[in-house]
Image (tube, grey):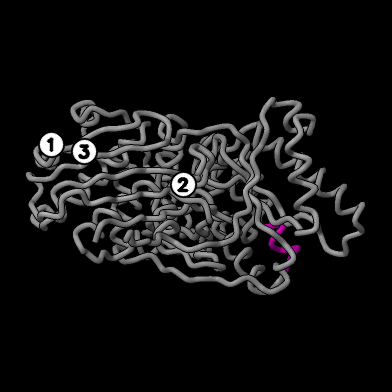
Amino acid sequence: MNGFIIKAPGRVNLIGEHTDYNAGKVLPFAIDQHIYITVKIIDQTLGFVKDLKFEFETTMKGQSKFFWSGNQIANFLDQDASQSDFSEDLGFKSETWQAYVIGALHMHFKRYYKTPTPIHVRVTVDSSLPSGAGISSSAALSCGMLAALARLQGITRDPIELATDGMLIEHRFAKTNCGLMDQIAVTMSKRNQFTEIDFSPFYRGGAPKISFIEAHPVFSQYEILTINTMVKHKLSDSPYNQRRETCAHGLLKLNEFLGLNKVGLSEFSDEGLLWQQVGIFGNQQMLKEWLIKKINFSPTDAPKIAHAICENNRVDRATKALVNGDLAALTLAINESHESLAKDYEVSCSELDLLRRTIALEVGSMAKRMNLEVPGLLGSRMTGGGFGGSTVQFVHHKIVPSLVAAFTSPQNPYSSKTKKIPVILGTPPSSGIEVEILT
């Protein structure tokens, strides 16, 4: 074997935002834009970690080249990656691409320290994924590197275990306390299917429950577009980690008040005892009021806790709508999700909200001119962790060319206010990580 290319896709989450780390449900899918990791074997002689020589190069922004020897790898394997000075010791910053590469080296060789490896390897990283767009370029890079290292040693890895290692790279090296959704979508998605993941079993010590959902034929009239606001986000510097702390605190108080033992807020979504006390099943406004009055949550924290609970129901509704071909129900669930994320969980931004409104107005007027007999737009919502990034929406295929043309002009309503030209990607559901052998 002379080498290989790992194609690690980005992902878009249709619905179920900030529920993965709350033991809830999500509905992501991989896309046809990728991180490409080319591994060329310079010296096929097999050695152990101390003998290795890795050369890394990328066309992405940041440090373009760096080198790691086997001795360097061996020296840092015993270090604690959770320590704040760990990145300084290793000579990288958490926001740089090499943080994910070194993180993958750390996680992989912790497991496979004694497995023989070709002693001289050259790795090139290229990308068709925009960074900071909310489509998981970091999960693609970390999981792609883990897959490449396993392939290099001839190791077949359990995809859930590999995805979990990818999540830990985010925690320990990028300082983002994310959930596991992105990594599973990157590693396990299937073409033309949505990846429904229920994380409740995972937080109870088992494996996440994963199902693959095919949309009803009526949705073939539509294209899934992901539209980048061109506002970049970096979750480790945003309030993302604070949201997790708020949810953890809310879980403790709710369990204590109701005498339950839930492992995440999203598990309360179907809890009869909770909704009996609130009054109406699934009513997010009433739930917020009850959390404030009965459990003394602050007016700041209560809406965030309510979002984590009620978003789980919206995933169920959206999944049923996809299977049954219910355009109106899917639209409602998607729009409600964004409103909750913007107003209650507070992870949207002015540009995301403006882009949604602009899309709705543009598509609405185009659909009217074309005399479409079905809706031109099936909802629009932010996708990803938030604080910038992209929106996701179903747009009727007859409207897509006109919409793309409208947004390429700086005179469109979004660009005239923000001075940013959004980038539109066609993002049909695609496959997870794939391997191409070099000859």
The answer to whether 59 appears left or right of 104 in the picture is right
Does label 3 or label 1 sit earlier along the sequence? 1
- Residue 316 is tagged as none
Question: In the rendered image of this protein, does residue 387 appear above or below residue 404?
Answer: above
**In the drawing, what numbered circle is on residue 81?**
3
Percent x, y of residue 121: 21, 47
**Three-letter amino acid code at disc 1?**
Gln
Q: For the residue marked with disc 3, what is the amino acid?
A: Ala
Q: Quadrant of residue 218?
A: bottom right
Write down the region rendered in magenta: 326-333
Question: What secondary structure is found at the residue carrying circle 2?
Answer: loop
Which residue, given by chain and number where applicable, does mark 2 sit on? 136
Q: Which mark is residue 72?
A: 1
Q: Residue 339, percent across and down? A: 66, 45
Classify mark 3: helix, strand or loop. loop
- Rounded to the nearest angstrom, the CA distance separating label 3 from label 2 is 22 Å
Residue drawn at x 29%, y 45% is 123
In front: label 3 or label 2: 2
- The reply, left or right, for residue 232 in relation to residue 421 is left
Residue 185 magenta-highlighted = no
Q: In the picture, residue 429 is in which quadrant?
A: bottom right
The quadrant in which the C terminus is found is bottom left
Neighbours of disc 1 within 10 Å: few (<14), some (14-19), many (20+): some
Residue occupying the point 49% across, 48% down: 18
Q: Relative to residue 209, is residue 368 depicted above or below?
A: above
Earlier sequence position, callout 3 versus callout 2: 3
Q: CA distance from mark 1 to mark 2?
A: 29 Å
Residue 281: x %, y % from top left? 62, 61
